[in-house]
Image (cartoon, grey):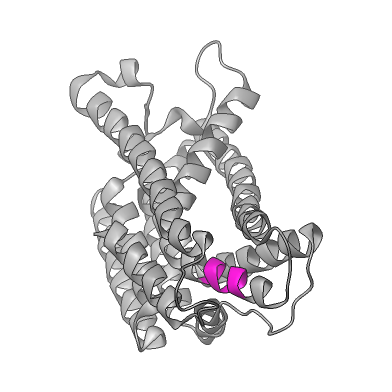
Amino acid sequence: MIVHIIMNAVGATLRRSPARDATAVPFSQRAFPGATTIAFAACAALAIAWGASIWSLWTMSTMSTMGDVPMPGGWNMSMMWAPMCGQKWLRVAASFVGMWIVMMVAMMLPSLAPGLWRYHEVLGRTGARRTVWLTALAGLGYFFVWAVLGVVLFALGSALMEAALRLPALARAVPVAAGVAVMAGGALQCSAWKARYLACCRAAPVAPKIRRGSYAAWHHGIRLGVHCIACCAGLTSALIASGMMDLRAMALVTAALTAERFAPSGARVGRAIGLAVIATGCSMLVLALAGR
């Protein structure tokens, strides 16, 4: 289903693009949807495989075998936040960031692809050379920003998990804190701040005349990434708090991000999603308080 969304969104963008030659379709215009879909499918498959392996371990193995640690408060700490016996912190961090990047490519590419194509078209109209390379560089800059966020999240998550291991009172508060974090993410999703950044992302701002060159393309991707992280802050925090490797949550967040970018009334869709996230956080909070 998500693959069809990508193809439809990119196809609509291509149809709106002015043709340079009515008798011939440029190679990049024919190749772009296929390359985008292949990249999405590959990352989605890796994310599903990762999640399936975790699910298999959860259903078939003992807790000691799979490496999760039972914590006060009735929750389990995943060892993706900390090294197991014989592992080094650098390896754990690299594994987390690699998994995070794969997730973000799979989740964000459906909403990013049309914007990248518009950037490619503007570059072409300015007479820039190597437009395919510059567009790819902009995409790399975009996901570089998400990779940096993954490093920051790993550092914060590892510090929190280490503190929870040392402080039972903090560990018992984690389920409650997760519910509150999801509710806060939903509230942010409904805010005017979110609506402002959503408008920027829906427009995929590309000036009629833009600077050409590798540095300008990289800077454009960085700018898109920063705007997108700000726009997705509520849903990202809710995803992390509710279970980052939950495939169902990942699919729902991907669908929500794509819907609010391309639906005719994106701001209304975003607020409706925010209300659903708040309701989910309330249910998590009630369950956490009932289990204390």
Task: Mark yes or no: residue 266 visible.
Answer: yes
Residue 203: image x %, image y %? 54, 82
Figure quadrant of residue 3: bottom left
Q: Which residues are magenta?
A: 115-121
Residue lying furthest left: 59
Q: Is residue 288 left or right of residue 158?
A: left
* Residue nearest the viewer, comparing 158 with 55: 55
Observer able to see residue 181: no
Viewer-side residue, 214 vs 150: 214
**In the depicted structure, whether residue 147 falls above or below residue 135:** above
Q: Quadrant of residue 74?
A: top left
Describe residue 122's horizontal placement relative to residue 81 as left or right: right
- The x, y position of residue 43, in whole percent, is 41, 43
Q: Nearer the viewer, residue 211 or 170?
A: 211
Position of 55 relative to 121 (above/below): above
Per the image, is 152 magenta?
no
Asked if 92 appears above or below 203 in the picture, the reply is above
**Extreme-front residue of the structure:** 23
Number of callouts in the render? 0
Residue lying at the far top in this picture: please name it: 86
Instruction: Tell me residue 24's x, y (percent).
Output: 46, 69
Residue at figure coordinates x 42%, y 59% from the top left? 33
Q: Quadrant of the N terminus?
A: bottom left
92 relative to 6, above or below: above
Which of the two residues, 250 or 138, is positioned nearer the viewer here?
Answer: 138
On the image, the x and y values in percent for residue 53 come to 30, 28
Q: Residue at x 43, y 65 (%)?
A: 235
Question: Magenta span: helix, strand or loop, mainly?
Answer: helix
